[in-house]
Structure formats: structure tokens, C-alpha cells
Amino acid sequence: MKSWPVQDAKARFSEFLEACLVEGPQMVTKRGAEAAVLVPVSEWRRLHASAKPSFKDLLLSEEARTEFLVPQRGSARRRRISPMR
């Protein structure tokens, strides 16, 4: 993956975009540190489709989560322990 300083990516955006489409993902660095990656839309869609929802997304979703319902407290029966002899 080729690395582009942010100022080069901005100044030569058409070349940056073309490199992404031909060669694949392109890294953008800011002050020498990796900052972002430009990926072709087909790769983005593939990654997005294969991503599972996060725990936070599941908790905030509007969908019913009936398979995870916890029974009401006190509804479970306990075994009686026979007295020791």
C-alpha cells in the first residue's frame, strides 16, 4: 500500500484517486503518522457487508431481542434439599 502525505494527496487528488482505483487502497499520513486510507468503493462495500454489528449497535437497535430475554425473578423453582440424616 502506497503512503501519501496529506499535502500530496490534496495537491494531486486525481492521481491519488486513480492510484486507489488501479493499485488498491492508499494510505494518507499526517505529520508522518497514519491517518486514513482511501479504498475503492467495491472494497468498502465488501468490508461493510461482512462487518458484524457492535455490541453497542445491538443494544441500541430497535429490533426485538426475544431470544435473549431473561425470565422474571422468582419464577424459577428450586430443588428442595432433603435434611441430612
Image: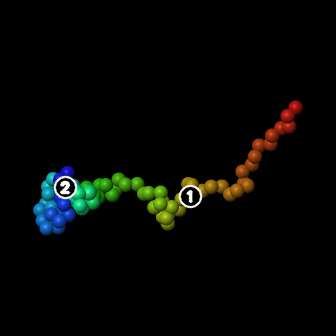
For discs 2 and 1, the disc positioned in front in the rendered view:
2
Return the x and y of residue 9 as percentages of the image width and height: 17, 64
Using a 10 Å C-alpha cutoff, classify the residue at mark 1 as few (fewer than 14 neighbours), some (14 to 19) or many (20 or more): few
Residue behind mark 2: 3
Toward which corner of the image does residue 44 lie, by quadrant?
A: bottom left
Return the x and y of residue 83 as percentages of the image width and height: 86, 37
Tell me the quarter of the image containing the C terminus: top right
Residue 17 in sight from this viewpoint: no
In the image, what residue occupies the spot 29% across and 55% down? 46
Residue 55 in sight from this viewpoint: yes
Q: Residue type at mark 2?
A: Ser
| Mark number, residue 66 | 1
In the image, what residue occupies the spot 14% across and 57% down? 19
How has the structure been colored for display? rainbow
Q: Indicate which disc, 2 or 1, sits on the residue closer to the N terminus.
A: 2
Q: Residue type at mark 1?
A: Thr
Return the x and y of residue 17 as percentages of the image width and height: 16, 62
Toward which corner of the image does residue 38 lie, by quadrant?
A: bottom left
Q: Is 13 left, or right, of 66 in this rendering?
A: left
Q: Is 81 left, or right, of 23 in this rendering?
A: right
* Circle 2 SS class: strand
Q: Is 82 left, or right, of 62 in this rendering?
A: right
Return the x and y of residue 25 as percentages of the image width and height: 21, 55
Q: Outermost residue toward the top?
A: 85
